[in-house]
Image (tube, coloured by chain):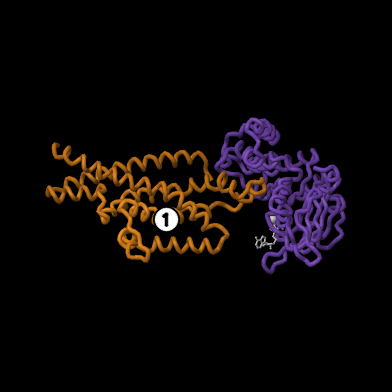
Chain colours: A purple, B orange
């Protein structure tokens, strides 16, 4: 990696538009994420939060706009409004810088916890088992699930599954982590353990985007909180400001509803 | 008892013919079925449509008709070819069973949650790696029961090759029965079919048990 890129923001998104059929889900989203930022994204259901995350790592393709990851262009739109993605190999390489954690975990049910962690490093990076195992073990210790290494996912609680999913994403050593409502599918008593793991990552200055309905968590952990509504970013400010003193009526209404 | 010893030789020779058709068909039809299924779920519309038509054709006409067509019918086609009975049987069975396997595989592949593909993709796995490492192993578990069923049916369907005058187990039994005016050879054939199916059943149960280590 050329050293000039080190100063580039981790993510730059400019004027992203995305539609499903006739439904415009993202209506010109711009954001910039710097190294170590923890961005919480909040907003009502259907406002496009998941779609935004999924556009950043190419699970969805955008219709217009520009996305750069660590200074490399993933997709751009020229003056004639033609939206172009980088070549497939480049897209893959760029997206590998980002790990993602899903609401419904999406662990591989036919693999044990340990196999879930080492699958991608071995298959994608071509690392050998001996190299990957110690790292994977360390990650499992970190999320407190070392003793579950040989269990299959179906034997784990929701909170444990999500912590495995986080460890699995970290095993690829991403620079950026994307979380899409990581605790929404969990029983209330299991939410804490997952949030603790994410908070720990924040303390280690992992760059993160977290879509969440946990307002207290967003307020406490994020360096910046983004409020989205109807495909737009309504407000993006420090959590202290946004929660204490929302500037927009829509933000205020949403926060009153949530708290 | 003497009579049993007398007919067991020919019956076993018939069994060998049956098993040969069975195994060769299996070895060819399973991969062909998998390939057809992959095309069927691919985004190549035309290829997928062609496979769809093929499956309709193979499931929409009797296997016996296909067998007769390939053996007796191809000769009359322009530039027609004459096939020996054995290759004709193998071709007909393989083409037919591949269609049934393809449908089972397709159902299995499409039953895998989209989240599995997305998780694999964000971890950097290519489409091929995702199919090989993540999707197919889970598909195998799900399709084992219906595939076992088809394979067991295949053992018995091989009896159709009598129309090509091939001496499979059932045709041999019938020959002896007609010659000696006794139903005994039929009983012998039934026992041998049952034994073959029993072996297969045990194998499939073992495989299902192996896949039972994880739940979904
Ligand atoms: N694949 C899709 N095809 C069609 N419409 C979609 C698709 N994915 C999302 N949508 C629609 O896009 C809009 C935004 O969805 P999105 O999932 O991004 O919202 P969200 O903010 O994440 O909501 P939630 O808080 O409920 O998860 C919704 O109206 C949704 O129905
Ligand atoms: Mg969502």
Instruction: Count residues near mark 1 (Cα–Cα under 10 Å), then give few for <14, some for 14-19, many for 20+.
Output: many
Image coords of residue A228 (percent x, y): 78, 59
Residue B113 relative to residue A162: left or right: left
Looking at this rendering, what residue extends furthest in the left direction? B181
Front in this rendered view, residue A187 or A94: A94
The residue shown at (65%, 38%) is: A126
Image coords of residue A142 (percent x, y): 71, 34
Secondary structure under tag 1 reads helix
Q: Quadrant of the N terminus of chain A?
A: top right
Residue B13 relative to residue A170: left or right: left
Which image quarter: residue B81? bottom left
Ligand 2 is found in the corner quadrant, namely bottom right
- Name the residue carrying label 1: B100
Q: Is residue A253 visible?
A: no
Residue A127 relative to residue A40: left or right: left
Looking at this rendering, what residue extends furthest in the front direction? B79
Q: Quadrant of the C terminus of chain A?
A: bottom right
Image coords of residue B164 (percent x, y): 27, 55
Image coords of residue A93 (percent x, y): 71, 47
Q: Is residue A73 visible?
A: yes
Which image quarter: residue B66? bottom left
Front in this rendered view, residue A194 or B216: B216
Looking at this rendering, what residue extends furthest in the bottom direction? A22
Residue A19, placed above or below residue A72: below
The chain holding disc 1 is B
Front in this rendered view, residue B91 or B97: B91
């Amino acid at each position: 990696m050329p050293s000039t890129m080190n100063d580039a923001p981790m993510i730059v998104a400019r004027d992203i538009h995305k539609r499903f059929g006739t439904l415009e889900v993202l209506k010109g989203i711009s954001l910039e994420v710097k190294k170590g930022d923890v961005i919480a994204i909040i907003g009502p259901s259907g406002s496009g939060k998941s779609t935004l995350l999924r556009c950043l790592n190419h699970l969805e393709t955008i219709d217009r706009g520009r996305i750069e990851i660590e200074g490399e262009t993933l997709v751009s739109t020229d003056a004639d409004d033609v939206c172009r993605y980088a070549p497939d190999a480049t897209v893959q390489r760029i997206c590998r810088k980002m790990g993602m954690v899903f609401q419904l975990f999406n662990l591989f049910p036919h693999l044990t916890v340990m196999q879930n962690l080492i699958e991608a490093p071995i298959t994608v990076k071509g690392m050998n088992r001996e190299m990957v195992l110690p790292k994977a073990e360390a990650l499992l210790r970190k999320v407190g699930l070392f003793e579950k290494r040989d269990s299959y996912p179906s034997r784990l609680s929701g909170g444990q599954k999500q912590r495995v999913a986080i460890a699995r994403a970290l095993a690829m050593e991403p620079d950026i982590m994307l979380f899409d409502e990581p605790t929404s599918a969990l029983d209330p008593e299991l939410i804490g353990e997952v949030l603790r793991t994410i908070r720990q990552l924040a303390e280690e200055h992992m760059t993160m985007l977290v879509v969440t309905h946990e307002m207290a968590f967003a307020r406490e952990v994020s360096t910046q909180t983004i409020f989205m509504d109807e495909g737009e970013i309504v407000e993006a400010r420090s959590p202290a400001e946004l929660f204490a003193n929302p500037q927009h009526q829509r933000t205020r209404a949403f926060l009153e509803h949530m708290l | 008892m003497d009579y049993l010893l007398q007919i067991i030789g020919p019956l076993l020779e018939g069994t060998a013919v049956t098993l040969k058709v069975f195994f060769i068909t299996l070895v060819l039809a399973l991969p062909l079925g998998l390939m057809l299924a992959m095309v069927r779920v691919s985004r190549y519309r035309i290829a997928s449509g062609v496979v769809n038509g093929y499956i309709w054709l193979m499931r929409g006409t009797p296997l016996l008709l296909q067998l007769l067509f390939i053996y007796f019918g191809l000769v009359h086609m322009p530039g027609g070819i004459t096939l020996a009975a054995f290759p004709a049987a193998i071709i007909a069975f393989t083409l037919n069973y591949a269609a049934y396997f393809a449908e089972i595989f397709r159902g299995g592949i499409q039953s895998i949650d989209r989240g599995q593909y997305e998780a694999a993709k964000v971890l950097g796995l290519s489409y091929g790696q995702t199919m090989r490492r993540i999707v197919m192993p889970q598909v195998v578990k799900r399709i084992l029961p219906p595939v076992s069923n088809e394979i067991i049916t295949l053992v018995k369907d091989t009896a159709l090759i009598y129309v090509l005058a091939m001496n499979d187990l059932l045709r041999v039994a019938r020959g002896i029965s007609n010659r000696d005016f006794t139903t005994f050879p039929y009983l012998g054939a039934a026992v041998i079919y049952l034994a073959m199916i029993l072996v297969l059943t045990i194998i499939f149960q073992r495989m299902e048990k192996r896949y039972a280590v994880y739940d979904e």
